[in-house]
Image: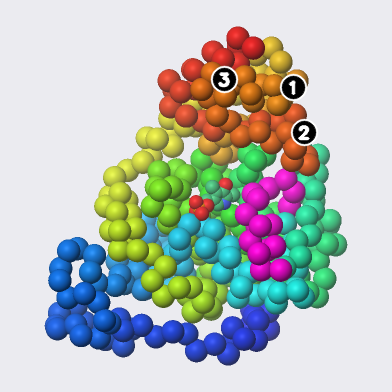
Amino acid sequence: MKGIDRLVRRNIAELTPYSTARDEYEGALGVFLDANESPYPNGWNRYPDPHQKKLKQRISELKGIPVGNIFLGNGSDEAIDLLLRVFCNPGKDNVVAISPSYGMYEVAAQINDIEVRKVPLGEDFTLDREALLAATDAQTKLMFICSPNNPTGNAFSNSELLSLAGAFDGILVVDEAYIDFSKVGSLAPRVAEMDNVVVLQTMSKAAGMAGLRLGMAFSNTRIIELMSMVKYPYNLSQATQELALQNLEESYKWKIDETITERARMAEALRCTAGVLKVWDSEANFLLVKVKDADLVYERLIGGGVIVRNRNKVPGCLGCLRISIGTPKENDILLKLMKEL
Ligand SMILES: *Cc1c(COP(=O)(O)O)cnc(C)c1O
């Protein structure tokens, strides 16, 4: 263990976190006159559990990861922002990210006044290990690698990622938002034993709860402790905690299976469509598709009532659209429009 405390901002290392009324007395029964809540029951009048114990316990069982290695947030976007605020001094430190990739790393860093060093992916969107490491310096605190990557759809191998973590003198953040759709296994079961890896996952994609806002970070207990110290005490509402627990009781595996089957069907069909130049293999629930005139196809699809993501202006994705896999019926509507163009 290299010990990560030297990477933490001094003001955070020295922080005394806010202590909630629910921290100071944790019993469930009694007359609660400690939090200035309304005493009149309506289902929501009490503050939610700031430690999300029940939900964490359930997620721990589902993922096979100890509760102490789990952070829950208002989407993975909260975890991204917290990592920046725990480790990066505004105006001084920097982070490294692959390009093209998920836009939130850059936006969250900019909001925190943290420089982002974007390192282009190699041929066919491969990871350029040497270029990534060359982009770092003593002020580089975090490296964001999205795998499977949005919008390119490819996944990086765990051995590549672990080798990168071993060579990097900062925290490697592996965003696994799409891992349920991939044949590459999650790195999450490995994080507890490593001092500098954080794995992000979300309930927004395969688990079908984008509207609830529930993201997860898995890491060693020290990093989880730091993130928990900095988060808003009540970052997950009672509604999110209860509804997520309810929803997690239902299996969504069939949806993942159907999406993977549809992904193969769509890739095949699009490859045989006039005007389609390239469809990359995908380990996610979307396809990156290069077409002859991306802006025109995008507008025509909207005209037909189908909205896709236009990535034509994104460096490395010129001429590309990112198309989510929908239900079989929805996919047929897209295909029909594409064939008519
Ligand atoms: C969709 C997505 C997320 C999910 O963010 P939430 O805030 O959890 O909804 C995270 N990372 C990537 C790369 C994504 O595409």
In the picture of the structure, the residue carrying the numbered disc 3 is 303
Q: Nearer the viewer, mark 3 or mark 2?
A: 3
Three-letter code for the amino acid on which mark 1 is drawn: Asp
Q: Is residue 75 visible?
A: yes
In space, the residues marked 3 and 2 are separated at their CA atoms by: 22 Å
Q: Quadrant of the N terminus?
A: bottom right
Query: Magenta region: which residues?
Result: 98-113
- Mark 1 vs mark 3: which is more N-terminal? 1
**Total marks drawn?**
3
Q: Nearer the viewer, mark 1 or mark 3?
A: 3
Label 3 sits on a secondary structure element that is helix
Q: Residues within 10 Å of mark 2 (few under 14, many from 20)?
A: some
- Mark 2 vs mark 1: which is more N-terminal? 1
Tell me the quarter of the picture where residue 90 sits: bottom right
**Which residue does the image show at 43% across and 55% down from the upper left?**
213
In the picture of the structure, the residue carrying the numbered disc 2 is 318
- Mark 3 vs mark 2: which is more N-terminal? 3
Residue 91 in the image: above or below residue 44:
below
**Which residue does the image show at 56% across and 15% down from the upper left?**
337
Q: Is mark 3 within 8 Å of ligand 1?
A: no
**Which residue does the image show at 78% across and 41% down from the upper left?**
315
Q: Residues within 10 Å of mark 1 (few under 14, many from 20)?
A: some
Residue 52 in the image: above or below residue 18:
above
Is 318 on the left or on the right of 153, as rendered?
Answer: right
Three-letter code for the amino acid on which mark 2 is drawn: Leu
Three-letter code for the amino acid on which mark 3 is drawn: Gly
In the picture of the structure, the residue carrying the numbered disc 1 is 293
- Image coordinates of residue 93 in percent, x first then y, are 75, 73
- Image coordinates of residue 66 in percent, x first then y, are 41, 68
Is 240 on the left or on the right of 164, as rendered?
Answer: left
Residue 125 in the image: above or below residue 223:
above
Circle 3/circle 2 CB separation < 8 Å: no
